[in-house]
């Protein structure tokens, strides 16, 4: 929370590390999923991308990391820029080499590989064996729980441990920008808190910029500097988190608080803005 | 007492041949795990390897080790060509089309070989000492012992490669999930290519070892078919299982040949693996170590 979005009065010379300009993504040549999606991430920030299920959050991350192509998806319009270069036609290997690493939704560890081997796979694009070894120690410092599990197959880890491994594996690539897709998914609240604390530490200590996709808006806004709210394939609202947290609609629809501050059930939550759904 | 010696002798020979099946099965499973391609041309890769090595040794009079290494190099080039120009364009096509492609490939390789070398059986110049060894009343040709050792050397080398090398780990990662491997910056295309290379190399080694025992002709490609019972016994997606499956099939085939041939007038050996295959499919459809497919309704 020490980091804040540079506003007019702050003259901090922060660079936009990533920008999505009006991108459009189509699956299977016909299903239009992102419809003019724009977003900017500044170096050193944690940026939260929030939105309901099916809004297109994962698609946005996959468009950035280039793994969309493997799913019959395509960026058909707009541009994606990373550190000044267009990357919308770069393959996933090139993206990782440039310093972007996506932690996919649903704790996608390599089940048949043990913890150490998962970490080594994460370091695939790096060369120095000595550095890789050193970084494994760093991962175990962030996630001490993984230390005793080093030789256990990832498939046998608990859900929380798998999420830790997935994030640790991302650290092994030493990315400049980490894309996290719903790290809280299916985890107990205490564990979510622990993991979010570590994400924040990684951001501060490793100077890793983070784009965090979440449905758990409360948690995400508690560690992020800036937030975007996405609906039906585009951004409908964005602000520094301090402002977002005070926004009545966000309170009502995403933080589950009605005006008097009582909890609302998620079922009552309507779309932030009603839009025609042409396709979905 | 004679019976026991006879049994042991059959088992030893079976183990030797089975170790070669295991080696070839490793190649088959590798391709399957990396890319879900069922390679019906595995036996033809083996046959081509045997012929190329034979030609180098006899027609070109190359010394064995040079001929052997050149054959492996040739197999790598062949595999890269096949992967790049035959299989890669098929990525994303239905499984049945890819199967048809590998069957087509097997026919092409077979006709290629028979047009160059004919169909006559050719004797492989002996690689290993031939003299039989006796232990108790067991008499086995040393060839079997050396064959077994040679397969084991290759199996151990590949086991170490997959366990400790970064490329080996990346290949296992890609076998686990192509998509997640891709997100690590692992080039899945390269993994496919390397899988084909390894498959072609182990097949060529297998072809040379079996050719050295049985002679070389076009029917060597049938070893590829025997690999199916081995991998199905072991579980289509388990490398260790495939190797073990190969050993078991080798032994069972030799035992059934040894004990049943005089009842049926020969040929039992050729049929036995497939009878075993049917039995396995009935009682353990996912093999001993395979992953059960979860049916989602
Ligand atoms: N591979 C795909 N092919 C076709 N449609 C897809 C594919 N992946 C996602 N979609 C569709 O795109 C929309 C957005 O999905 P996604 O990006 O996963 O949303 P979110 O992560 O916000 O829940 C959904 O309507 C989903 O059905
Ligand atoms: Mg999602």
Image: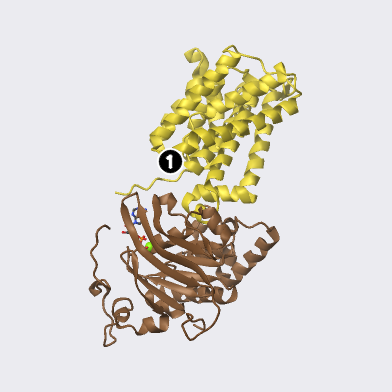
Chain colours: A brown, B yellow
Indicate the chain on which mark 1 is placed.
Answer: B
Residue B29 horizontal/vertical position (percent): 52, 38
Q: Is residue A208 above or below residue A85?
A: below
Would residue A56 be found to the left or right of residue B233 on screen? Answer: left
- Compared across the picture, whether B145 is left or right of A224 comes to right
Locate residue A187, reporting x and y percent: 41, 69
The residue beneath circle 1 is: B286
Q: Position of residue A172 (x, y in %)?
A: 59, 63
Residue B160 vs residue B94, the one in the foreground: B94
Q: Secondary structure at mark 1?
A: loop
Q: Please identify the residue farthest to the bottom as the structure is shown.
A: A260
Quadrant for residue B185, please give it.
Answer: bottom right
Quadrant containing the N terminus of chain B in the rendered view: top right
Observer-nearest residue: A254 or A11?
A: A11
| Residue A182 position in % (x across, y down) | 42, 67
**Image position of B42 (left or right of A217):** right
Residue A107 visible? The answer is no
Q: How many marks?
A: 1
Label 1 near ligand 1 (CB < 8 Å): no
Residue closest to the eye, A145 or A59: A59
Residue B101 in sight in this render: yes
Residue at 34% in and 49% down:
A29
Q: Residues within 10 Å of mark 1 (few under 14, many from 20)?
A: some
Residue at 43% of width from left, 73% of height from top? Answer: A48
Outermost residue toward the right in this view: B63
Q: Tell me where residue B7 sits by quadrant.
A: top right
User: In the depicted view, which residue is nearer to us: B135 or B184?
Assistant: B184
């Amino acid at each position: 929370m020490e980091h804040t979005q540079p506003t007019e009065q702050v003259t901090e010379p922060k660079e936009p590390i990533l920008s999505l300009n009006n991108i459009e993504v189509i699956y299977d040549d016909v299903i239009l999923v992102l419809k003019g999606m724009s977003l900017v991430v500044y170096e050193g920030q944690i940026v939260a991308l929030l939105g309901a299920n099916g809004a297109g959050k994962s698609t946005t991350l996959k468009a950035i990391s280039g793994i969309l192509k493997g799913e019959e998806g395509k960026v058909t319009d707009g541009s994606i820029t990373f550190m000044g270069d267009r990357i919308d036609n770069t393959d996933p290997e090139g993206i990782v080499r440039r310093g972007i690493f996506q932690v996919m939704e649903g704790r996608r560890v390599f089940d048949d590989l043990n913890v150490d081997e998962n970490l080594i796979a994460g370091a695939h694009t790096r060369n120095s064996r000595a550095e890789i070894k050193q970084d494994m120690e760093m991962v175990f410092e962030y996630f001490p729980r993984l230390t005793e599990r080093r030789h256990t197959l990832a498939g046998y880890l608990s859900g929380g441990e798998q999420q830790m491994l997935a994030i640790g594996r991302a650290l092994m690539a030493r990315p400049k920008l980490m894309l996290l897709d719903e790290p809280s998914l299916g985890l107990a609240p205490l564990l979510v808190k622990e993991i979010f604390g570590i994400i924040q530490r990684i951001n501060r200590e490793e100077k890793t910029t983070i784009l965090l996709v979440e449905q758990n808006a409360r948690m995400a806004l508690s560690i992020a500097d800036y937030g975007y709210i996405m609906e039906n394939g585009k951004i409908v609202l964005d602000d520094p988190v301090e402002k977002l947290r005070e926004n009545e609609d966000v309170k009502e629809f995403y933080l589950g608080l009605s005006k008097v501050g009582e909890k609302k059930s998620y079922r009552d939550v309507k779309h932030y803005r009603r839009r025609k759904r042409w396709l979905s | 007492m004679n019976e026991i010696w006879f049994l042991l002798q059959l088992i030893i020979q079976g183990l030797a041949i089975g170790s070669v099946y295991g080696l070839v099965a490793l190649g088959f499973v590798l391709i399957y795990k990396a890319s879900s391609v069922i390679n019906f041309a595995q036996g033809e890769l083996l046959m081509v390897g045997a012929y190329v090595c034979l030609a180098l040794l006899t027609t070109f009079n190359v010394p064995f080790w040079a001929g052997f290494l050149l054959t492996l190099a040739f197999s790598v080039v062949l595999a890269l060509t096949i992967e790049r120009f035959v299989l890669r364009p098929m990525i994303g096509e239905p499984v049945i089309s890819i199967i048809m492609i590998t069957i087509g490939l097997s026919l092409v390789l077979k006709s290629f070989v028979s047009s160059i070398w004919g169909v006559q059986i050719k004797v492989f110049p002996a690689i290993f000492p031939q003299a039989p060894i006796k232990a108790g009343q067991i008499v086995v040709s040393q060839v079997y012992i050396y064959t077994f050792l040679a397969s084991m050397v290759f199996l151990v080398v590949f086991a170490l490669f997959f366990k400790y090398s970064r490329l080996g780990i990346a290949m296992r990662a890609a076998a686990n999930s192509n998509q997640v491997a891709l997100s690590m910056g692992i080039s899945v295309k390269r993994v496919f290519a390397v899988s084909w290379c390894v498959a072609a190399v182990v097949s060529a080694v297998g072809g040379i070892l079996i050719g050295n025992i049985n002679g070389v002709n076009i029917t060597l490609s049938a070893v590829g078919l025997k690999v199916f019972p081995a991998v199905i016994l072991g579980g289509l997606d388990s490398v260790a299982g495939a190797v073990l499956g190969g050993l078991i099939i080798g032994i069972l085939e030799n035992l059934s040949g040894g004990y049943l041939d005089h009842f049926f007038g020969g040929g039992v050996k050729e049929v036995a693996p497939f009878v075993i295959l049917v039995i396995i499919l009935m009682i353990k459809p996912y093999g001993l170590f395979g992953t059960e497919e979860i049916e989602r309704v």
